[in-house]
Image: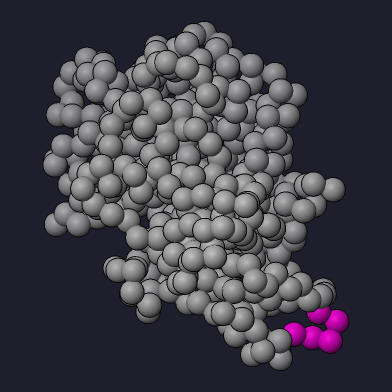
Amino acid sequence: MTSTLLRGRTLSFVRWPETIDDHSAWRYEEDGGLLISDGRIVASGAYHDVEKQAGEGSKKIDHRPHLLLPGFIDTHVHFPQMQVIASYGAELLDWLNTYTFPEETKFANAQHGRRIARLFLDEMVRHGTTTVAAYCSVHKASAEAFFAESHDRNMLNIAGKVMMDRNAPDGVLDTPQSGYDDTKALIKEWHGKGRQHYAITPRFAITSSPEQMEMAGALCREHPGLHMQTHLSENHAEIAFTQQLYPRSRDYTDIYEHYGLLGKKSLFGHCIHLSEREADALSESGSVAVFCPTSNLFLGSGLFDYQRFRRRDKPLRIAAATDVGGGTNYSMLRTMDEGYKVIALNGEKLNPFQSFWQITRGNAEALSVADKIGTLDQGTDADIVVLDARATPAMRLRMETAQTLAQELFLLQTLGDDRAVREVYVAGRTAKSDMAN
């Protein structure tokens, strides 16, 4: 197979950058090279060193002066909500009932599901995101549509059919048994097919009865290697309603704990209003708290205390995500721009290296897939984003005074969007330019 040699300024991370000057936390090559073969990175480093390993017939692509980073990773996103984004004037529970649940009833139609799955993954690629952890609708067909589209593109994605059997319209309800059966069938069909991963997905405790929560726990025990994703502690009214539904629980987290849903591959969206006991339980189990800043601001849910959660004696594993459609855009650059503001409102700062660690290696570690994606390491999958810090007139003007890599990254985070994404490689193949053709 013909190999491809990419040239550009390469940046990837080896660990969390403690400070803006923590240079040993990342690898940066001013003139870097990535040699790709059979969908994987087979060599990375200084261009002239990597070039020596390329064969005579290697295809050479010069992306200078742009930055080459691992493809962005979005750890919590609702693909059926594309036509819900930018819906006015509601907090979480009203927003679900007024906008989201009626929209998700449409996904009983497999053709509609396939159309939205195609457009959703187009949008991810356009914004430089190469992996997502996605919620489908309650309908088995929606998950089939998502996985089929993802598999056709050879993307590494994690997804699951939501399980929900109460407190929602009939058109988006399953039963404990049908949710279990559909999930089992989808796992058998799609988990491990190509680069596809299945996530057991009880939407949240409000829409799952104790019987369904038992089924979700049974699925986790039967398939211990799978992800589990749900929502936790997003909104005060949600927390109060949850406590009414599960009056014997100590707190919201205790419900998931009781049914065996905490663990190293368990992803909990939002986690804004956690008690110290709940944070301890998540930390001790290795569960992941997913920060969704644009959604938390848009729905008025609250401020995720990112730096305190990282610093506490029992720190939390943290991921970052767009959420959509509670979130306001599809871009991980825009997400971290809003994340910076949320963290600033908590009296802290997030330096730009920390932001880019989070949406690459940090999110890969949170998803337990850093051996495959999230870095530019030899042997990993060649999911790569090419960023142009001069993509717009405003960015070009600001770049005239940017003197450091940190300033360039912060500019990309603050002013960048899909226009700053020049190219995307999925398993070594161009994806963004191919989509435009």
Q: How are the colours assigned in the image?
A: one colour
Overall secondary structure of the magenta section: loop
Residue 74 horizontal/vertical position (percent) = 50, 47
Residue 222 part of the magenta-drawn span: no
Eyeballing the image, is 227 above or below 38? above
10 vs 75, nearest the viewer: 10
Is 72 left or right of 424, judged from the image as shown? Answer: left
Eyeballing the image, is 301 above or below 247? below
Is 325 left or right of 432, judged from the image as shown? Answer: left
Count of numbered circles in the view:
0
Q: Is residue 187 visible to us here? A: yes
Q: Residue at x 40, y 60 (%)?
A: 352
Q: Range of the magenta residues?
A: 54-58
Residue 400 found in image quarter: bottom right
Residue 54 horizontal/vertical position (percent) = 75, 85
Is 2 left or right of 423, judged from the image as shown? Answer: right
Q: Residue at x 70, y 70 (%)?
A: 63
Residue 428 horizontal/vertical position (percent) = 71, 64
Eyeballing the image, is 245 above or below 23? above
